[in-house]
Image (spheres, rainbow, N blue to C red):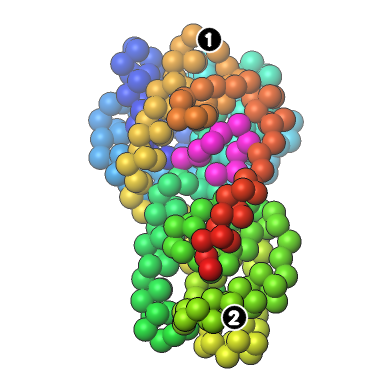
Amino acid sequence: MNPAVRAVVRTARDKGMEVYGVNHGYRGLMEGDLHSMDLRDVSDIIQRGGTKLFSARAPEFKTEEGMQKAIDVCRKYGIEGIVVIGGDGSFRGARDLSLRGVPCVAIPGTIDNDIACCDYTIGYDTCMNTIVEMVDRIRDTTESHDRCSVVEVMGRSAGYLALYSGIAVGATSILIPEIPYDLDKDVIQVMEETMKTGKQHFVIVVAEGVGGVEDMARKIEEKTGVESRAVILGHVQRGGSPTARDRIVASLMGNRAVKLLMEGIGNRVVAMQKEQIVDFDIFEALQMKKSIDMEIFKVSAEISI
Ligand code: F6P
């Protein structure tokens, strides 16, 4: 998110606009927690994880009173447009504010890559690379001890992280919330088949939305005789210095968002499709559907044997 914040501030200042940073998202907007930002306020953040502007959940913002508080703050500071970074919930807030006369442009920021209008959301690549690095480390013990590691990665309701990181780490099985699974057929049998060809260690990648990795590891050990361990990667996946891809995409998106606002265009989502930066009406963006590519899921199984 920091490279996006930096690009927004730099682009807006370059065009002669005044910029405020709002701390803690919509919560800060309702509370009037904002401060003027200039070019040097975003120096040395392009390489930092997290967000200089902090983040928060803001249930009150969904209420009419909460929305009104935010609008009052915008009027008080003379705010004529807002760039919002986040997922679907943030987009809905941006749509509602736009409807009430505060033009907003949203940028997709979530490690889950589960925003329908976008092929790519900022944070995803950094998270994927962290998962790959962590699982490569886990694999060293898995391999030297002839074990099975059952690794839970984030993705409470979306399996993109698990599917693609699973391919990248050479997982024997990948379990994601979108596709029902059968432990015997999709994990145990696959392990047993590969054992016949000499395989002795295994990595199973499980999305958080599937869960139950401790139990799974116990059952795998019972049924296959392969010593098994569960590992939950947790919040290491949500931090760390952004990758080059994330920095570039976030920078381009931040720049586009400001240019849209400059033209007086609000209620838009900036997105990436087929490697191009594009933008959509927020209403349309929220109607779109995105689903797991079943062909890719099949490929992951074909190359895991
Ligand atoms: O929405 C992104 C996400 O990273 C999910 O994959 C994960 O389940 C969740 O956030 C974790 O959120 P929290 O830190 O609030 O538990």
Magenta residues, start to end = 113-122
Left or right of residue 9, residue 202 in this image: right
The residue that label 1 is drawn on is 264
The residue that label 2 is drawn on is 192
Left or right of residue 136, residue 305 in this image: right
Q: Is residue 118 magenta?
A: yes
130 w.r.t. 224: above or below = above
**Front in this rendered view, residue 250 or 297:** 297
Q: Secondary structure at mark 2?
A: helix
Left or right of residue 143, residue 184 in this image: right
Residue 291 rendering spot, x and y as whole percentages: 66, 43
Q: Nearer the viewer, mark 2 or mark 1?
A: 2
Give the overall secondary structure of the magenta segment. Answer: loop
The amino acid on which the numbered mark 2 sits, given as a three-letter code, is: Glu
**Front in this rendered view, residue 223 or 118:** 223
Q: Residue, x 29% and y 44% (percent of image)?
A: 47
86 w.r.t. 130: above or below = above
Q: Residue, x 40% and y 23% (percent of image)?
A: 255
Q: Residue, x 53% and y 68% (percent of image)?
A: 305
**Front in this rendered view, residue 240 or 190:** 190
Quadrant location of the N terminus in the rendered image: top left
